[in-house]
Image: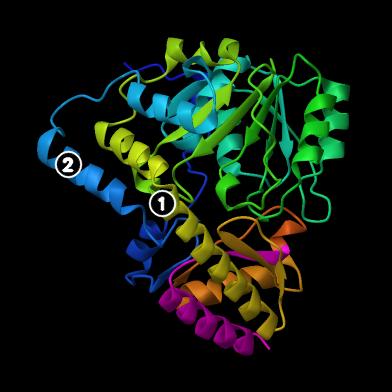
Amino acid sequence: MTIKIDAHIQALPATIPFVAPERTERESGNQFVARLGANENNLGCSPNAIEAMARIASQSVGQYADPENFSLRRALCQHLGIEMNNVVIGSGIDGLLGLIVRIFSSPKDTILTSAGAYPTFNYHVAAYDRTLLTVPYRDDHEDLDALAQEAQKTRPAIVYVSNPDNPMGTWWPAKDIENFINKIPEDTLIILDEAYGETAPEGTLPAIDCTRANLLRVRTFSKAYGIAGLRCGYAIGNSALILPFEKIRNHFGINIMAQAASEAALKDQEWLMQTLETNAQARDRLSAIAIENGLKPIKSATNFVTIDCGQDGAYAMQVLKGLMERRIFVRKPMAPVLDRCIRVSTGKDEEINQFSTALAAVLKDLQ
């Protein structure tokens, strides 16, 4: 007898949104000398977070975590000036996006995003049998006007936008985001992905307003705070939007070490400021390397720089493959027009040195 599998799930490809560097290393038999593709914080995390993890490992790792994430939520509320019922913790933004799609839409509902935007969101849309609708980027930015116009026309269940953006690194000032939000129908949920909010210029993030009935903002400890491996993020919103998470979330999904490390990292704002300064310097250096090699860096507000290779997607793929062959891990956008670029994360000086040398060699080989 064959065990029944949901027909929709049976029809989906067995795939993941990203090919991990570990898989490439296994298949090639070579380790990367510079891991600059996953937008991780190669500079590390706060020493206070490391101390918290060490304390948990030696004293409490055998215990279940607090299923209410109370201490971390309280710290976030104090930091952001919000109430406890305005925030929910999840296993990174990725985990939260899956819950949001499940909670706030039904099978076959339309969900709107930008063509080429964060693919893990699309993965959840497909997994829950929703209908994905996209609009193209404009001038390497998510097109807020086009998204708003499409939302007014089709009235999707959800519209997703990130600010700053992945994979291009571009951003909109807060006033443009606020104008966009005000144009979206009241019965459409807005997901505002602010994974790179800490690395953005002042004036990028709108003030937090939890009275808005159709807005969820998602943030993470994976990027600027440097603890991607622990998988911890959070959503901010009106209490009526936060409450449904309690009905279906994995209440023990945020482990005890992730909770303690995230809280310690949040409280160490001095370390965060140092990290942001170092990240900005690395971003400037990556941009300079691109220019030195005749390529065009796209101005970034994130912890990566997207580099226009000056030709089409096929050429950019050759550049990427050449870097990978030289053991430099990078990624690239895959949507048409955006695919002319590669995307390089900020990293340590020695990693950027390796990238600089390899990029020059790759471009010379392609002449």
Question: Image quadrant of residue 261?
Answer: top left
Near-viewer residue (8 or 152): 152
Q: Identify whether 265 is placed above or below 355.
A: above
Mark 2 to mark 1: distance in Å?
Answer: 18 Å
Residues shaded magenta: 340-367
| Residue at mark 2 | 55
Magenta region includes residue 261? no
Dominant SS in magenta: helix
Q: Identify whether 328 is placed above or below 185.
A: below
For the image, the number of numbered tags is 2
The answer to whether one can see residue 11 in this image is no
Quadrant assignment for the C terminus: bottom right
| Residue at mark 1 | 226
Element type at marker 2? helix
The answer to whether one can see residue 328 in this image is yes
Amino acid type at mark 2: Arg
Residue depicted at 40% across the width and 16% down the height: 4
Which is in the foreground here, disc 2 or disc 1? 2
Near-viewer residue (173 or 297): 173
In the picture, measured across the screen, residue 52 lies left or right of residue 326, that is left
